[in-house]
Image (tube, rainbow, N blue to C red):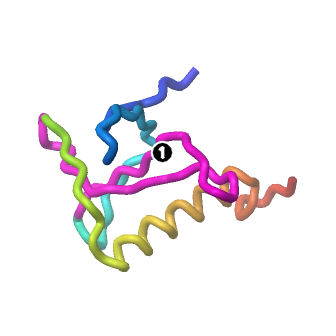
Amino acid sequence: MEEKMTFKVISDEGKEVECEVLFTFESDETKKNYIVYTDNTLDEEGNTKVYASIYNPEDDETKLLPIETDKEWKIIETILEELQNEIHGKGNGTEE
C-alpha cells in the first residue's frame, strides 16, 4: 500500500488543516518546483478541492509560495488534466 504524504497548514480561521500531497514537479519552462495538494474537502459541485503552490525542495522548513502568473496556472492545469485523463482511462488506448 502506498503511503500518503501529508502536511499541516493553518487556515485563515486559525485552524490546523491536514493536507495530502497529490504530486510535486519541477517545470522546465519556469525552473520552479510546484506542489499540488488537497485538504479533501468538496466544492459546491462535489469535486475535491485542489490547491497548488511554489516550494523549494532544498529548504529545511518548507514554505508554500503563491503562484502568481497565468502561465504557471496553465502549466499546472495541463498536468492535472493529463493525470485525470490517465485515471479515467482516456488517452492510453483503453475504454471504460
63 drawn magenta: no
In the displayed structure, would residue 74 be above or below residue 11? below
| Nearer to us in this view, 4 or 94 | 4
Q: Outermost residue toward the right?
A: 96
* Image side of residue 81 versus residue 36, left or right: right
Residue 26 lies, with reference to residue 18, above or below; the image says below
Residue 20 place in picture, x, y as percent:
45, 37
Q: Residues within 10 Å of mark 1 (few under 14, many from 20)?
A: some
Image quadrant holding the N terminus, namely top right
> Is residue 51 on the magenta stretch?
yes
Q: Is residue 94 left or right of residue 41?
A: right
Residue sticking out furthest to the bottom:
70
The image shows residue 57, relative to residue 65, as above or below, that is above
What predominant SS class does the magenta segment belong to? strand
Q: Position of residue 96 (x, y in %)?
A: 87, 53
Query: Residue 63, image x and y in percent?
Result: 19, 46
What's the residue at 29%, 38% (across, down)? 14
Q: Answer with the quarter of the image where residue 15 lies.
A: top left
Task: Check the image and report above or below for 7 versus 94.
Answer: above
Instruction: Residue 30 in the image: state x and y as whole percent.
Output: 26, 71
Residue name at image x 41 percent, y 32 percent:
18
- Dividing the picture into quadrants, the one containing residue 82 is bottom right
- Does residue 10 appear to the left or right of 57 in the view shown? right
- Quick one: 10 or 79, which is closer to the camera? 10
Q: Which residues are magenta?
A: 32-60
Amino acid type shown at disc 1: Thr
* Image point (24%, 62%), residue name: 32
Residue hosting label 1:
38
